[in-house]
Amino acid sequence: MNLSKVQQLAQGYTQLSSEQKELINTQVKTALARIEKEPKSLPWRLRARVGDRVKWYREVDEVQ
C-alpha cells in the first residue's frame, strides 16, 4: 500500500519535474514487480488475505 501511495502522491508534487515523476513511477513499478516475484511465506499470505481489516502489529505503547 505504501508504494502505491508514493506513486500517487508523487504525481501531485509540483516541485518534481516530469522526468523525476516518471523515475519514481518506474522505480515503484520495479519494486512491486520484484516483490510479486518473490516466494511468500505462510504468514505473509495470511496477512495478505486478511488485509488491513485486522491490526497485525503492536503499537509502540503496547510493547513492554
Image: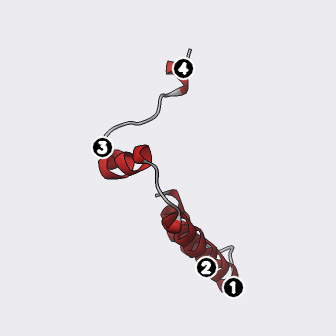
- Quick check: 56 left or right of 27? left
Say which label, 3 or 1, has the lower sequence index. Answer: 1
Q: Within 10 Å of the Cα at label 3, are there few (<14), some (14-19), or many (20+) other Cα atoms?
A: few
> Identity of the amino acid at label 2?
Thr
Q: In whole angstroms, how far apart are the C-alphas of marks 4 and 3?
A: 21 Å
Q: Position of residue 27 (x, y in %)?
A: 63, 73
Say which label, 1 or 4, has the lower sequence index. Answer: 1
Q: In whole angstroms, how far apart are the C-alphas of marks 3 and 2?
A: 30 Å
Label 2 belongs to which residue?
26
Q: Residue at x 50, y 70 (%)?
A: 8
Q: Within 10 Å of the Cα at label 2, are there few (<14), some (14-19), or many (20+) other Cα atoms?
A: few
Reply above or below: 48 against 60. below
Label 4 belongs to which residue?
63
Q: Secondary structure at mark 1?
A: helix
Q: In whole angstroms, how far apart are the C-alphas of marks 1 and 4?
A: 43 Å
Say which label, 1 or 2, has the lower sequence index. Answer: 1
Q: Residue at x 65, y 85 (%)?
A: 18
The numbered disc on residue 53 is: 3
**Tags 3 and 1 in contact by the CB under 8 Å rule?**
no
The numbered disc on residue 19 is: 1
> Identity of the amino acid at label 3?
Arg
Decide if residue 12 is in sight here: no
Reply above or below: 2 against 64. below
Q: Secondary structure at mark 3?
A: helix
Q: Secondary structure at mark 2?
A: helix
Say which label, 4 or 3, has the lower sequence index. Answer: 3
| Front disc: 1 or 2 | 2
